[in-house]
Amino acid sequence: MTDLEIPVGKRTPQYRFFEMLPLILSVSLILLPIILSLVNPLIATIFIVAYLIMFFVKAVAGAYRTIQGYNFLEQAQKIDWQQRLDDLEDPQIALMRVEAQLKTKNRPWRIADHHRSLRHVIAAPKKFFKPSEAYNAVIIALYNESRDVLEPTLRALFASNYDLSKLILVIAYEGRGPERCHKLAHDIVAQYKDKCFYAAAVEHPDGLPYEVRGKGGNITYAGKFLQKFLKKQGIDDEQVLVTTLDSDNRPHPMYLAYAMYEYIRDAERNRRAYQPIALYVNNIWDAPAPMRVLATGNSFFTIINATRPHTLRNFAAHSQGMGSLRRTKLWSVRTIVEDGHQYWRSWFAFDGNYDVTPIYVPIYQDAVLAETYSKTIKAQFVQLRRWAYGASDIAYVASKGLRKDRTVPFWGFWAHFIRLVDNHVSWAAAPLIITFGAWAPLFINADSQHSIVAHELPQIASQLQFLAMFGLFITVFLTFKMLPPRPERYKRRRNIFMLAQWLFMPVTSICYGAAAAFYSQVRLFSGKYLDKFDVTVKAVKKD
């Protein structure tokens, strides 16, 4: 099996090249319209128009997938996933009822898939196990968050439509965190231990060798504790689905049952991760307008990705079987982006035979909100630069996939690698090219024979951008449908601000999106690695 770890210390020249590659490509792409305008304005115009058309096509596809994903989200929340999970307990009896449902006009969502699953379980019972034999283990990472942040997460978790006697809770708190969080972790365990199969608070020691200061080390230490507990209890790893949550992640009531249903019915369960939809709406009414735009954009980004399972990656809260986690030695302790990086660790651990299954119910999360407006502005950038540091995976993937003794498929590697590079380069470069690229030929060649083309290009770009705004209108409409109830402390005029906030989108895409991506790429280029997980500040506004 391929070594899964990120290098420690000095990198090889090849590894350093691929760490530098994202910035090289991003800067080159931004400078290309300028260089082409100096060399041949007509070619520059063709390039810019082609890029804008590509942007327009992506916007149309994004609008379609936004509607599709929202429909999946709505339909999935109407299903009694605990019932479908219970059907796997005795599939022979359930099969008759499900076959009757198949004949109705208003068939439940994906009932045909459920019917096939029951038949598979009946045909090959040794590949499956019963829900009564399975456990959901939830690891909640805690650093410096308050009870006001953590308590709603626990309430949501224990309000799940799931057999809580099959729930294992682990509060993973940092030894370097404040003393009040140490006490909070143990208080939470004392409060909830009688409501589930088992609960424990696990302190992650500070300063363990080869660890960056991040969430990965914390949940990995808790995961090792969980493995020892399961072994002591005689519980098989394959019968345990592990979900990692941040302290502000509030699972949908059906999430545990839905994820466990997907896990049990999949004979290849150890080669899967299970990814819910992240909706950043917990405190959306309280967050400042720029943060609301970014939070809403991130929510719809996860909705769109859920409709494209072949591109889906581990992100934020997600689930993975303990058998699969044992194969990867849990999570990485050497990166601050342990969630996305876990996909690549698993992909290489299973020789390219690894996928992410979408779970179409949400994990509700907080938008960025600190004690003051200025702190919120800074905290938002810190969060995005940490996400953008996923560009560090480019060198990691290249180092594993370009080896002569690689175990992953050749074409599968290149498809994954090119998509990974494109995502991070587009993150940095696309907002700048879309906003300013069409003006390059005009400023550089205003008095040349190509000035007519140069003058027309901004207008063409404006028209394409206007057409692409159709996707934004869909997003705005669906945003209002997904908003939680307006707190009583806000009057109806707050709705107007929720609409006007979208004027910030061009600014946030550049000042936050592109800037955060460039910051992370510059750090990788210079070898000044981000080796500390900057926890996003979480403030709670009360009436």
Image: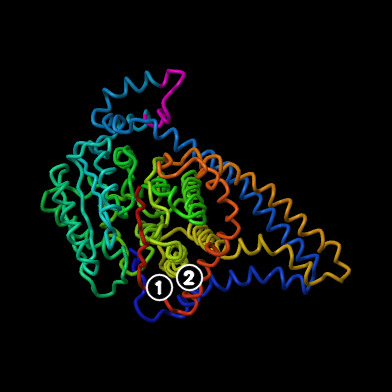
Write the residue at 81% across / 64% down. Answer: 454
Q: Residue 337's x, y, as percent?
A: 39, 63
Q: Quadrant of the N terminus?
A: bottom left
Q: For this rendering, which residue is in front, 102 or 164?
A: 164
Left or right: residue 122 versus residue 407 is: left
Residue type highlighted by circle 1: Leu
- Residue placed under numbered mark 2 in the picture: 520
Write the residue at 31% across / 49% down. Answer: 270
Q: Is residue 362 magenta?
A: no
Task: Kindly report the distance in space between the C-alpha atoms of the residues bearing marks 1 and 2.
Answer: 8 Å
Q: For this rendering, which residue is in front, 468 or 257?
A: 468
Sequence-earlier tag: 1 or 2: 2
Is disc 1 placed on a helix, strand or loop? Answer: loop
Q: Is residue 471 above or below residue 394?
A: above
Residue type highlighted by circle 2: Ser
What kind of colouring is applied to the model shown?
A: rainbow
Residue bounds of the magenta highlight: 102-114
Camera sees residue 344: no
Write the residue at 14% across / 47% down. Answer: 193
Left or right: residue 482 versus residue 183 is: right
Q: Which mark is residue 462?
A: none
Camera sees residue 159: yes
- Residue placed under numbered mark 1 in the picture: 530
Mark 1 and 2 residues: CB-CB less than 8 Å, in contact? yes
Q: For this rendering, which residue is in front, 259 or 7?
A: 259
Q: Is residue 306 above or below residue 211?
A: above
Which quadrant holds residue 487?
A: top left
Write the residue at 47% across / 74% down. Answer: 524
